[in-house]
Image (cartoon, grey):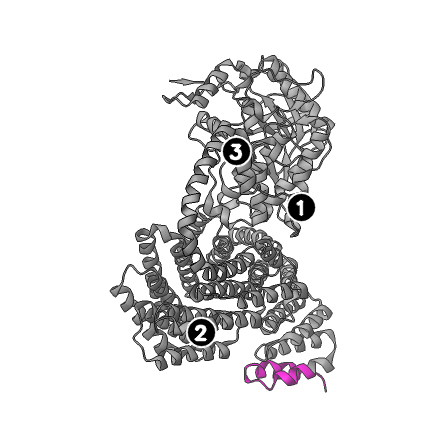
Amino acid sequence: MTRRGLPVEADEDPFVKSFRERLRATPPDILPGTDGMPDRAPELAGLADLVPVRRGGAGLVYRATDVASGRTVAVKVLLVGQTHSPSARARILQEASILAALDHPRLVRVLDAGEIRDTPGWPDGVPYLVMEWIEGKPLDQCIGVEALTVTEAARVVRDLAGALTVVHAEGIVHRDLKPANVILATGPDIRPAAKLIDFGLARIDEAGGGLTTAGEILGTPGYMAPEQAAVDEHLGEVGPATDVHGLGGILFFLLFGRPPFAGRTAVEAFANVVKGKIVWPTAAMRQLPRPLRTILETCLERRPARRYPSAAALESDLGRFLEGRSIVARRPTVPARIGGWCRRRPVVAVSLLLWVAFILTGICGLAIHGLQMRQAREAAIASQQAAQASLEQLPDGAMERIISRSPPLDENSVEYLRGLMKLYSDTPLGPDTRNGARFRITRLRGLAAIFARTERIDDAIECLDLAMRQCDDLHHVAARGGALSSERIEIIEEKLRVLRAANRLEAAEAVVRGMLRWVDDAAIPLSSRSADLVATARLGLGYVINEQGRTEEALPVITAALAELRHLSEDDPDDLEILRNELDGYYYASAVSATAGRSEDRCNLLRTMTRRAEEAIERFPAEAAGFEEKLVLGLASLADAEAAAGRFGESLAVVGRLREEVDDGLRTYPDRPFFRHESIEAAIRESIATRGLDAPDRSLALLEEALVNARREVAMEPAVYVHAQRLVKVLQNLGLLHEAAGRPALAIDAFREMIAPLEPWAEAPDRKSPIRSIWSGAHARIGSLLHRQGDMSGAVASHEQALIDAEPAQRPPILVALASAALESGNTALARRAAEEALLDPATSTPAHQILSRIPD
């Protein structure tokens, strides 16, 4: 049996029964009817091209064109089933008056209002509002692929709190704050901007201004505040604190993807509202910065008096959080909560106190002797735990702020991170030496990752060396070759990855060879885990040797390491780490095969990698995220391999699978930035394949999609080099596409834009050479395009700029291009100098001779 679409369940929960009784007493116009809207759009004066875009609980929203101004507007029409309800019509008129009287960038503006007249299929008198059109979508659709980051979510709610401050100042309470009533305006070059809509349930605190009658239930069960349920009279009346609770509900949804009061039905959700029963996602909450957790919990307090006193106070605290300052809100302490409970239940509290006193008297007498014996040890452990706890409470938001700053890092940020390194390395170990050392190792490795992401390579290496020393110091309390020895190998491999990413190939090779010597010198039987790590280290060695151009030397090293990993995986098929490293082995071996020109071997290795990754996803669903990433990497490399072999159709088919996996990862793991980054890489690869199949329009659309996302990543985390590198990659492909399509002006724009993202990194010692090489190539391309357009002076200037940053191997062809442009511009002296230098390289001697032969003596 159902009533108005809400299921009736056979439970005896008094709160649920109470809700049903109130629901039956609610006037019919409060709940939207199920009458269908007319098939055709209404005819409204001054408006054209009405297209339905959204249906809500109170009405239908159309996109339309204002005939007079030509701008796009939104038209909200009341549901036909509510047309003849006086209170429903009054609500839409109230919404018009409220929005027309308010002026705030985060509130939707009302432009006009009226009633439908003389439209076939529509009854007369249906009210409508004409509002500004906001390009975007409701917040309740910003999940999965389009989910906001923690910082963006906090910024959106802060802006909404600012808007509600203006609303509350006019004596208005919204009462129905939820993600569906907030539109997120988006654009390629702007930050997400939220706008609050739908004031149909707002209450105006003026004589005769309210439309609410006693006993009405207004709001959305998943997001409404407990006082809106009107069950507990001690909670007080609906007021600004109700909207503060609503803002907390929106923040909860943006962070966790569901309403705070979840339920299988509206009835169950309402019962949770009445009880104040929020099921907090514990694991996800732990990943939030501590100040943001406090803000969220304060907003969602059951009692209004414990929430923020106003929307302005919430806006201020969110601003403090976003700026990295201490917030004002504090969670009630345990003694305060206990005290409040005792005041509400004095009789029970006194009884419990007497029992506790009686029991404690007996226990204390028995425990005094043991307490004295343990006192010294407990004091030392407490000191150690206190030191670790204080370090664990260092604000996580500081890390996020650092990577969101423009590179290079300022000295204050660097000193802050180095101060953390000293604190972590100097933490007292106390009597529990093993636990203290593990704390140091974990924290130092995490800090090394931050240093590496922000290109502080030397600091990252120092962190890892400090962590390694902790492993070495513990050898006297740990079995040789045991867990700590494996951990030491893991740290060395992290060091290898950092050095390799920074292009310090010789140092990386020395590190891994030193580790292998250390393992051989230890002369101890290795555990399966340690043997796996050693084989993975040999993979890394082969990869580094190959990157230095010694491919023939790298092939046997990497082949032997991969064979060892396969053997270990066969012996222990359920060891996830061995399986992950085996997948890495296929990836590394394919890279070496590519350098050696063995394209078929490369493709076969990558096909094996993807097949093994798919098997792992099926066998280990709890660890699927990590194996999904391996599968994506394998498919991406396989697409590259097929394209490199000229098989663009096969490459496009692989990219299709790649896009499916990336999109699935974005939906399933929205908090993992890997899939967000790989969606950009997938678009680039699909563009390359479609360009190879002579589909330039599709290729251009894909690159433009990738460009929007790449710019967004750089804006979010400017201090992370790989984001800038990925943006340059997109721009380079875009420039090449425009050049091939005969659009030289657009190609020049793309190549010029390539230079800007890497500008802040130009003086970084570990990135200087690759950056200057990229710059040289961009300037050379611009020079060639200007040459073709007949702009010889511009071509000469671009080629001269290209020579400034060119690597030795880049110089000869640039010199030939410079000589040719200089000759055509009439600068024979420059043409002669450039051609004579190009003459020294065998690869460019012929064109250089030809240019010299054209220069008059």
On the image, the x and y values in percent for residue 66 come to 68, 29
Which numbered disc, 1 or 3, marks the residue that appears first in the sequence?
1
User: Is label 3 in a helix, a strand or a loop?
Assistant: helix
Q: Which mark is residue 829?
A: none
Badge 1 amino acid: Gly
Is the C-beta separation of discs 2 and 1 under 8 Å? no
Badge 3 amino acid: Trp
On the image, the x and y values in percent for residue 72 come to 66, 33
The residue labelled by disc 3 is 341
Q: Which mark is residue 473?
A: 2
Which numbered disc, 3 or 2, marks the residue that appears first in the sequence?
3
Give me the residue at 52% from left, 33% from top: 341
> Can you say which quadrant of the picture contains the N terminus?
top left
User: Is label 2 in a helix, a strand or a loop?
Assistant: helix
Q: Is residue 151 left or right of residue 205?
A: left
Q: Which mark is residue 319?
A: 1
Q: Is residue 35 above or below residue 387?
A: above
Q: From mark 3 to mark 2, how far is it between C-alphas?
A: 50 Å
Q: Is residue 109 above or below residue 189?
A: above
Q: What residue range appears in magenta?
A: 833-857
Q: Nearer the viewer, residue 147 or 344?
A: 344
